[in-house]
Amino acid sequence: MDLTKLSTETRNQKSMELDTMSVAEILQLMNSEDQTVPLAIQKQLPQIENAVEIIIQQFKKGGRLIYLGAGTSGRLGVLDAAECVPTFGTDPSLVQGLIAGGQSAMTVAVEGAEDSLSLAEEDLKKLDLNEDDAVVGLAASGRTPYVIGALKYAQTVQAATISIACNENAEISKFAKYPIEVVTGPEVLTGSTRLKAGTAQKLVLNMISTTSMIKLGKAYQNLMIDVKPTNDKLVERAKRIIMQATDCDYQTAADTLKAADQDVKVAIIMILTGSDKDNAVKNLKQNDGFVRKAMKED
């Protein structure tokens, strides 16, 4: 294994004297280096767009989005998947995150798990991976065997394959139909890819999941209309969303949310169209959950 060819493993010339720098100097350097990440992502926007388009297509066929990686990359995938549930009101099965070594690897490293080519196949078989699903393999180095194994297996069942690496000509790119290579370069702390590389992966995952969900009708204007009011804080957020979407007062939002059985989308349609709950629900269903389209039915 030759790590010297990976830009994420090379030494950053700006931080050669890192251990002698003051706290302020370290922070300034890290901040300066972090600012290069969005520019690296910008170069890959066409590739990210292709990945998002295929994910949307898979969702519309009833498929799922499966993130998969080891270490920091795996944890970031699990995090993004978990956050889709409260943000977009999705079923936990719709977006899932797998990490080499299982859930215990979220907090404690599982020795050897990322080096297995077969472990990912076993993990994906447990999920009954099929041709309607999309698999996103994450690896800062671009050469993690666990991710390669996942993408190779995903190809055999004809699932959509996407990779996200932080090095050029990444090994995992060879096994993905939609490769994304965000080259973030040497880390301030050599080889610590939880820094710029981790930030890049997090930003790309934000783009992938958020854009996909918006295109599934889970936003109206720029509001989170599929948020599920499962606690007091979220109930208040739901009321505020209704107020912002309709320009109604607090009491109207509260009363309509209750009449809509706590469904923010239905409440918005009821207020903006003057329809009752049953018609709002019917129109929403006929328009695949898109609020704007549902309002045109009245």
Image (cartoon, rainbow, N blue to C red):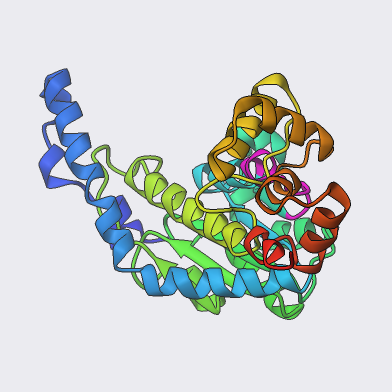
**Position of residue 259 measured from the top left corner of the image (x, y, whole percent):** 83, 36
Q: Residue at x 22, y 35 (%)?
A: 30
Q: Nearer the viewer, residue 174 or 201?
A: 201
Residue 86 included in the magenta stretch of the image: yes
Q: Nearer the viewer, residue 106 or 233?
A: 233
**Position of residue 40 measured from the top left corner of the image (x, y, whole percent):** 28, 60
Q: Is residue 259 above or below residue 150?
A: above
Q: Is residue 141 above or below residue 18?
A: below
**Position of residue 14 measured from the top left corner of the image (x, y, whole percent):** 11, 42
Q: Residue at x 62, y 56 (%)?
A: 67
The range drawn in magenta is 82-94
Q: Is residue 261 above or below residue 211?
A: above
Q: Is residue 183 visible?
A: no
Residue 117 included in the magenta stretch of the image: no
User: In this rendering, would 199 be left or right of 108?
Assistant: left
Q: Residue at x 40, y 40 (%)?
A: 194
